[in-house]
Amino acid sequence: MANVLLTISDITKEALAVFHEECQLIKSCTRKYEDRFNRTGAAIGSSVDIRKPVRYNVTNSADITGAVQSSEESVVTLSVNKRKVVGMDFSSEDLTLHIDDFSARFIRPAAARLAREVDLEIAKEILINGQRVARATITNDVSFADCTATNAILAQQFADPDRRIYLDADNNASVVNANSGLFQSAELISEQYEKGVMQTSAGLKFVNSESIPLITFSGTITAADVVLTAVSGATSIALDGITGTATEIKKGQAFSIAGVNMIDPETLEAKPKAYTFIASADATISAGGATVSVANPIVANGAGVNLSTVNVSALPATNAVVTFLEGAATAGDSAYVIQALAKDSVAFASVDLDLPGVSKMEGRENYDGVSMRILKVYDGQTDIGIYRLDLLFGVKVLRPEFVTSMIGKVV
């Protein structure tokens, strides 16, 4: 029987299936917001506001005079601002292949590469959010206790019990090797030895991912303090008195501030654990000072404050001591940032790109909240079809309190 040419629908569906299989971090994301965007052809820059739950105070008296609260929600903006494209060319002979052969040779490498890029974008968003677990030293292997510490923070914030921790291959291998006897029921232990997969333990599903970010430190930071008391809603903190060899505070580097603690998400009372700030961009250190940007506004409870925005027990105060969690890192030290997060703490939305009608070979498919488009332009002289595989999407951390991270072993 003569071969039948693969259709654009065959190719698009297969590419989307491979993408879904290969993408790891997206499995922790909620993908329910894509319907809020224009489904007839989205444009980059489109955005929607996503409401966060209201927080209420509780009184101890039957009389609530003066204690009635406004049911004011806070919002997080999800923007479709990321575009990923893979360009490919196929001959008519290539299209006579069976879909399995065609996928192995062409689709799988392209879709897997695209999945890696999407995972990297998700990981970059996670990097600058949430709380950081302080490890005793980043020159040692990651321990089981380090991993359980990330889960403890999520538990204290009442995060969804479906939680994953993403580790690079080296850190994953060291945790498996050191703790293989502690993980899993007997029928799953073999997977640790055969595949390096730990499945679920200590309330976390362990996942190997090579898409988590890498930080390269500029040197040690032995001391620092806050210049002035932060204003409620501030998205940056001015530091001075910085000592050590570091020339920059790197994006993703974490620090705590004396007197600023985590809060109970319901009562808003201070917890006996320091809140960790994470730099959302590189900050140059000059004359012992630097201004560090953070991803989320710094808000403490107080008069006129929308309770759903509160994230710290108190605002950073003038001259408060600052401690860098990875302050002992030396110049050139590089380490992966292991990320743990609860389900639906991050939003992912991809939207339908327009089919311009310039070719008979145009396809768009949507599966499990991911929309992918493939277009073909044909060159009759060479009998080569040029294909473009497009994905337009946005990523946003909805609940920073449901995200934790730690620095892995220096590589």
Image (tube, rainbow, N blue to C red):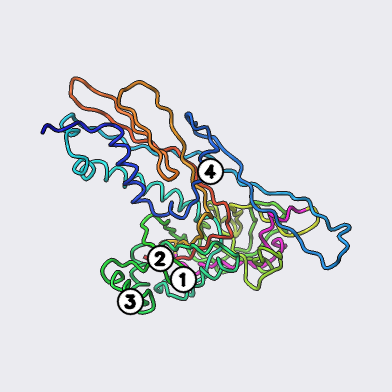
Residue bearing the label numbered 2: 206
**Viewer-closest of 405 and 108:** 108
- Viewer-nearest of discs 1 and 2: 2
Residue furthest bottom as drawn? 181
Residue type of the residue flagged with mark 2: Phe
The answer to whether marks 3 and 4 mark residues whose Cβ atoms lie closer than 8 Å is no
State the residue position of label 3.
186
The residue under label 4 is 33
Q: How far apart are marks 4 and 2 (CA)?
A: 27 Å
Q: Distance between the residues labelled 1 and 2?
A: 10 Å
Q: Name the residue under label 1.
A: 147
- Give the residue type at disc 4: Tyr
The verdict on residue 163 being magenta is no
Magenta part of the chain: 305-330
Tell me where residue 212 appears, x and y as whole percent: 41, 57
Of labels 2 and 3, the one closer to you? 3
Q: Nearer the viewer, mark 1 or mark 4?
A: 4
SS for tag 1?
helix
